[in-house]
Amino acid sequence: MEISAITAPKAAGMDSLVSRVVTDPEMREIAEDMRRIGKERDDLGFVRDGNNLMESDALLLIGTKEHSGLGLDCAACGFESCKEFNEAEEIDFEFGGPNCIFKLLDLGIALGSAAKTAAIHNVDSRIMYRIGVSARRLNFLDATIVIGIPLSAEFKSPYFNRET
């Protein structure tokens, strides 16, 4: 899966993606942080996804590093030019920004490639942004945006049709 993500096409041939495979006890640390966030925010999604991660066998994190605009001046990032994007004040909440739309597309393609590989090998997976929030918060990956793909090889997928 990680190889599928790493070798996925990149805009302008410029790679800004990072990845990491995580197993216990680090997975448990992320899951516990997710449940803590869920309780603090009264957000059952974080609690549910944290519980799902606890039932997983492994986790793949994929993120995009801090990056400059590609020089296309397309304004998809919300700025009129890549120069303006590059000079913009950084923000940091669940994820960091701003981000170039093409780098986000690279991230999406890498996530899709990784999930496809899991499916080919009959491994249950689900792309989860909440895992990325905790993984980034805990410094598991040096990236502005991190997304997690938990993996399970059980008789029933823990990611669908389960209660919170």
Image (cartoon, rainbow, N blue to C red):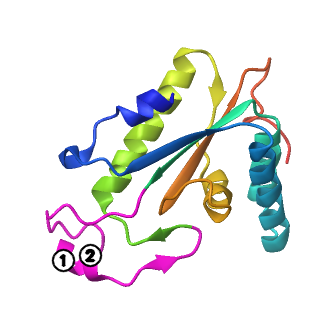
- In the rendered image, residue 149, in percent from the top left (x then y), is placed at 60, 39
Q: Residue at x 78, y 41 (%)?
A: 52
- Which residue extends farthest bottom? 89
Q: Residue at x 78, y 20 (%)?
A: 154
Mark carried by residue 104: none
Mark carried by residue 83: 1
Residue 113 visible in the picture: no
Q: Residue at x 82, y 69 (%)?
A: 42
Q: Residue at x 49, y 59 (%)?
A: 145
Mark carried by residue 86: 2
Left or right, 60 with respect to 102, comes to: right
State whether residue 148 is above or below residue 90: above
Label 1 and label 2: CA atoms lie apart by 5 Å
Q: What SS does tag 2 mark? A: helix
Q: Residues within 10 Å of mark 2 (few under 14, many from 20)?
A: some
Q: Which residues are magenta?
A: 65-94
- Which residue extends farthest left? 72
